[in-house]
Amino acid sequence: QNIIIHRVLPMTKRLIQRVTNEGDVVVDATAGNGNDTQFLAETVGPNGRVFAFDIQQEALDATKERLEQNDCLTQVQLICDSHANVKKYVEAPISGAMFNLGYLPYSEDLSVVTRAESTIAAIDALLDLLKKDGIITVSVYDGHPGGPEERDALLEYVRTLYQKDVHVARYELLNQRNNPPFMLAFEKMRDFTTHERI
Ligand code: SAM
């Protein structure tokens, strides 16, 4: 089947693939169980670098196991810290970054969720680190406690970005059940290392 209107998660991967080559540096801002980390590690290959963040050791352990099983751990640095601190660990230029917001699936404690303040701080920092034409994808869920607040703050934040600096798009399937995510995609339109907000 030759799908064109993909569901959100495959669409995030397609966008990242468009801007990422072997040997590039990329960021997984929310490692979780390592799905996106593995995808990024396979996309940049053994000569590339993936910086994968999570605030839960449980998530990084699951990610590490997945990467080992798929023979792509060597190009990944696992970082147990908030993505808001990305500039402490990562230098420009990066080609892309992915966020998958919400809680760690299958965890016993579903109360640890991404929060607007750190998510926005991380996107802001990653926009500075991104090369021109680079892409950030954010999969946004609003079906869990705290989700609607994070969604609303994000939608307010994106309106403060100048269009000459960044293009921001929202993508979603409108006929899916069970609170599917929507995607925010950010494309860096010109070179900058610190941007202003409206
Ligand atoms: N992409 C992941 C996967 O493929 O399994 C799923 C990510 S999960 C929906 C969200 C993750 O974000 C959780 O593991 C959670 O611990 C993590 N998280 C929450 N706040 C964070 C923060 N400030 N910095 C980094 N990770 C955070």
Image (cartoon, rainbow, N blue to C red):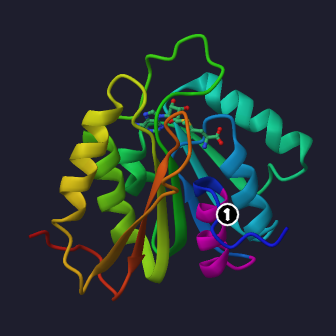
Q: For mark 1, does the 10 Å Cα neighbourhood hold few (<14), some (14 to 19), or many (20 or more) residues?
A: many
**Looking at the image, is 125 positioned above or below residue 17?**
above
- Nearer-the-camera pick, 114 or 45: 114
Spot occupied by residue 197 in the image (x, y as percentages of width and height): 13, 69
Residue under numbered circle 1: 49
Q: State the quadrant of the C terminus.
A: bottom left
Query: Most extreme residue toward the front, as rendered?
Result: 175
Using residue 157 as the reference point, say whether residue 48 is left or right of it: right
Q: Which residues are magenta?
A: 10-22
Is 168 rendered above or below residue 191?
A: above
Q: Which quadrant of the structure image shows residue 78?
A: top right
38, 154: nearer the viewer = 154
Q: Position of residue 159 (x, y in %)?
A: 18, 65
User: Picture quarter containing residue 58?
Assistant: top right
190 in relation to 37, above or below: below
The residue under the point 75% across, 37% down is: 64
| Kind of residue sitting beneath label 1 | Arg
Height in image: 89 above or below 35?
A: below
Where is residue 13? Give x, y as percent: 65, 63
Place of residue 97 in the rendered image (x, y in percent of width and height, measured from the top left): 52, 62
